[in-house]
Amino acid sequence: MTLAETAARDAATDVSQTGAKRPHRRHLLQFLALTALPASIVLAQSAKEPPRAPSNPVETEAGIAIKDPLVVEKCGTCHTADAKGNLSRISYVRTTPEGWAQVIRRMASLNGLSITPTEAKAVIRSLSASNGLSPEEAKPVSYLPEHRIVVESNIPNETIRQSCAACHAFAQPLSWRRSKAEWSLLRNLHVAMYSQADAQFRKPVEDPTQPVPANGAPKPLPVEVALDYMNKNAPLMTPEWTKWQARQSSAKLGGKWLVNAFLPGKGLYVGEMMLTPAGADDDYTTAITLKSLADGSTLTRSGKGLVYTGYSWRGTSSSGPAGARPDAPQDHETRETMQFSPDRKSAEGRWFWGDYTEFGFNVKLTRAAAEPTVSAVWPYALKAGSKGASLKLIGDAFPAGLKASDIDLGKGVTVTKVISASPTEAVLTVDVAPDATVGAHDVGVGGSILAAGLPVYKKVDYIKVTPETAIARLGGSEKHTPGYQQFDALGYDAGLDGKPYTADDVSLGPIDVTWAMEELPTVYYDDDVNYVGKLSPTALFTPAIDGPNPERKWGRNNYGEVWVVATAKTEKDALGKPLKGKAFMVVSVPAYKRWDQPEVAK
């Protein structure tokens, strides 16, 4: 059997990407593969590459038995069960809720799967429990379901970048665990379904990090390097998953959670999130109240959420009818992706909205308890040498008659007076010694500790504009909505080593700056800054409308590349000039195709 025939056959039955078998689809894929692949194979062999055996893997690993009757009913018609209860293909992969949602979508669109939204939710939940990821496996790729800007430093070498991250985020394959046979079949699927994949996999890579084969042996293909990496780093069974399977249980998250939420462009919000069990295990209704520490405004939201695999929260919340401000959370339904700690005492994640999910809170939750809990401090940081500085602690269950001696802010920071105290807030006067240790100090009230909650600094050494690299999308026409971008300017102390951009640097939160855009010259007569869009005084970038612009040279679209520049109003550099920070922004055309799995939060 040729590689093309093998790839076509495997693609027609691949559950991890295309779903279950459907005869007429199989014939179509076989035809496409047989007519498209041989030319690339001939080219590869004409380059004097030794023939390689076609991949026709046989499953040899112990699978994960599928016991849920609904999953067996919906999937078992095409994915046959063996004597141990393993469903072909399905029992040999694990992934996130979004991964399973993607599978179901593809099964329905390519293979005729008939499934209701309620059934799909139940199947995703069941497979996430039996064939999911452990918290340790999910955390490194959490930026993908949290819809953060993808800037990946976890790609081990250029060969793997070409094979696995040229078309999608590296987090996409790293969100899966597969048997060796399944990783090989995924390769075949790509070759059969995506015309560029075969050429991409066989394209020579000049990667100095790859060892030179001994005795004149041929260099491995890029896809072979990638498969070797995935087999070693993302196998089907891992110690982390085995341990989590023993621990996995109902999350039991009902009760009050303290919220610390940072919204780019608007600052720190604090409040509470009440989780009330609703119906099935790990389904909840939510009531959220947040207060901005920057301007005192409040947000009240309600919603619902559910937990997958014992720790993965997916939810939605809203506060009423949609309004007109794209960056205002009160005007939009917000989706919530969080990961609870294994002890169910804290959580981190992102609540987001926008047509490109470009807006969002960075959220930390702390479970309220009988003992005092500190969830946030205000202001963001204190300067060494400060006398009589005001500091606010926000939390829960602060004791009556709170005294200065009950509070510990670390070496060199002394509470001189408790101005006021309530169960949820304490206002303090503090002195910071000139030689106070630079860094993020712990904040203690009684036995409660907010780890690294209070940065102490000597001076602002530099400004970092976040995100450092960004993409916005033209829009505003009838067909395409704009993709906005919000920036922040964060101050940093260079830390104890005095060197900027090192691990001990101390983030001081947003600082007061003025904003501007500058040209990033890439071609002659570059004029992008005049056409790409507008940057507001609060660093909200609104892109220009999409489509050819007759006012621009050659009638070009309004795309382009610019610098987003923040200039400090008070902080100076060593030469007495205002500190500046820059971010690189690409303003591109609308995204004509989008991949998302919003149903996991329904």
Image: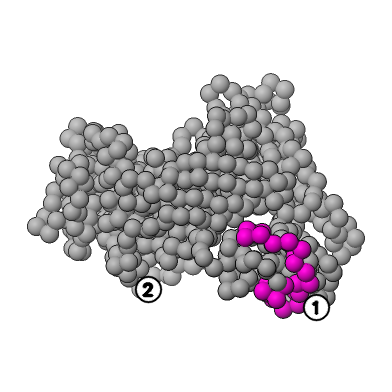
Q: Residue at x 74, y 37 (%)?
A: 536
Residue 274 picture location, percent across and down: 49, 50
The type of residue carrying mark 2 is Ala
Determine which residue is flagged by label 2: 214
Q: Residue at x 66, y 30 (%)?
A: 544
Q: Position of residue 201 (x, y in %)?
A: 38, 52
Residue 173 visible (yes or no): no
- Magenta stretch, residue numbers: 404-428
> Camera-side residue: 381 or 291?
291
Left or right, 319 with reference to 428: left
The Cα–Cα distance between marks 2 and 1, rounded to whole angstroms, is 59 Å
What element does badge 2 sit on?
helix
Viewer-nearest residue: 441 or 136: 441
Q: Which residue does the image show at 13% across and 51% down from the upper left?
A: 81
**Residue 435 numbered tag:** 1
Nearer-N-terminus badge (2/1): 2
| Vertical placement of residue 598 versus 368, above or below | above
Queried whether the magenta region covers residue 576, the answer comes back as no
Camera-side residue: 419 or 115?
419
